[in-house]
Amino acid sequence: MEHTRCLIIGSGPAGYTAAIYTTRAGINSVLISGMQPGGQLTTTTTIENFPGFPEGIDGFQLMENMRQQAVNVGADVRDGLVTAIELGTRPFVATLDGGAQIEADTVIVATGASAKYLGLADEKKYAGQGVSACATCDGFFYRKKVVAVVGGGDTACEEATYLSNLCSKVYMIVRKDYLRASKAMQQRVAERENIEVLYNTNTVGLFGENGVEGAHLVRFKGTDKEELFDIAIDGFFLAIGHKPNTDFLAGQIETDEAGYIVTDKVTTATNVEGVFAAGDVADPHYRQAIAAAGTGCRAALDAERYISTHSL
Ligand code: NDP
């Protein structure tokens, strides 16, 4: 069976950064890219908050650059999926789609998290044309425009507050008659005059000729007060939570209630010795590309230290 000293799973900023660091440290490592090579950034447009690019950079291009940089320093970057991994053995054994298996002395899990969507066909239809799941990434493109944020949790409140600094008006579409967010976040929303919260409201669809121009909504769905109405918006932001991509681990690594991998805080070590986690899969708080790249670096250094301590 093929053997690597470090198997990196995932090809977002965390995965590629880990590959660059491990390879430069002389550790032969294999990176398996996952379902969406390049990760979440490949679905955004221009990225203006990743340092080093004064004019901003296209998200897809940024990830291509990272991949090329990893390849240039000698990392073995492969497209494919890790469908299962056995963490009870030493070395670990990963199974790839297609059935091939790789033995690994260390593993860096950098599989990211996926934003949850409502499941409307229009979300796909207008992807990149007014539908976004990241206000920090895309809010800038909606300056002085009208947007809606779906959700009533802390993320939704945070995104709505962020957008209210840029946009002329922000609707919050909240399915219940209250916000689930913390009192402090609710207060911040209440203080913004240009945020209007639409309670008891669900989204039925989106419309527009050239990108999103509005949303079809329903209030008091399924009751005798049910009411259909439309709002005119330029942007539709999902903030209904994220799902960390950990299914393939089959419960072998400790996660929190929401499924994020728990690391030991000081390092990127998980509860399984020799397995490290980096990027959004272990980060419920920041979820930024630059933060993910930083933890990718840390995971690589942690793996390198583990390898040398254990003479692997
Ligand atoms: P949450 O799960 O807390 O909230 C999700 C929100 O989306 C809820 O209002 C929920 O509605 C709504 N929702 C879920 N599914 C649907 C749907 N299909 N249609 C309509 N609405 C839907 O997720 P968050 O991302 O907001 O937060 C995740 C965690 O991160 C939380 O623990 C949060 O406290 C934390 N966090 C903390 C921050 C901070 O402290 N600054 C900032 C951001 C996040 P309902 O209430 O009806 O279930």
Image: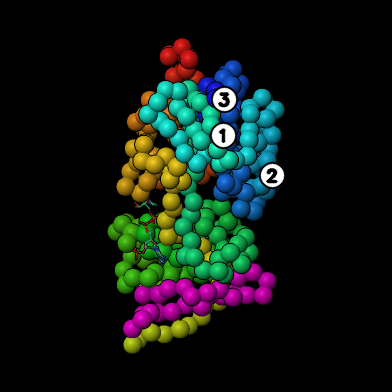
Q: Which residue is tagged 2?
A: 61
| Between discs 2 and 3, the one toward the N terminus | 3
How many neighbours does mark 2 have within 10 angstroms: few (below 14), some (14-19), or many (20 or more)?
some
Q: Which residue is tagged 1?
A: 100
> Residue 20's x, y, as percent?
60, 28
> Residue 143's x, y, as percent?
59, 62
C-alpha gap between disc 2 and disc 3: 31 Å
Q: State the residue lying farthest toward the bottom.
A: 224
Mark 2 near ligand 1 (CB under 8 Å)? no
Q: Amino acid at mark 2?
A: Gln
Task: Tell me: residue 169, above or below residue 286.
Answer: below
The picture quadrant for ligand 1 comes to bottom left
Where disc 3 sits, the SS reads strand
Mark identifier at residue 2: 3
Q: Is residue 50 visible?
A: no
Q: Point out the stretch of residues depicted in magenta.
A: 200-223
Q: Is residue 207 magenta?
A: yes
Front residue of 157 and 84: 84
Give the residue drawn at x 53%, y 32%.
Answer: 101
Q: Is residue 261 visible?
A: yes
C-alpha gap between disc 3 and disc 1: 9 Å
Do the residues bearing badges 3 and 1 touch, measured as CB atoms within 8 Å?
yes
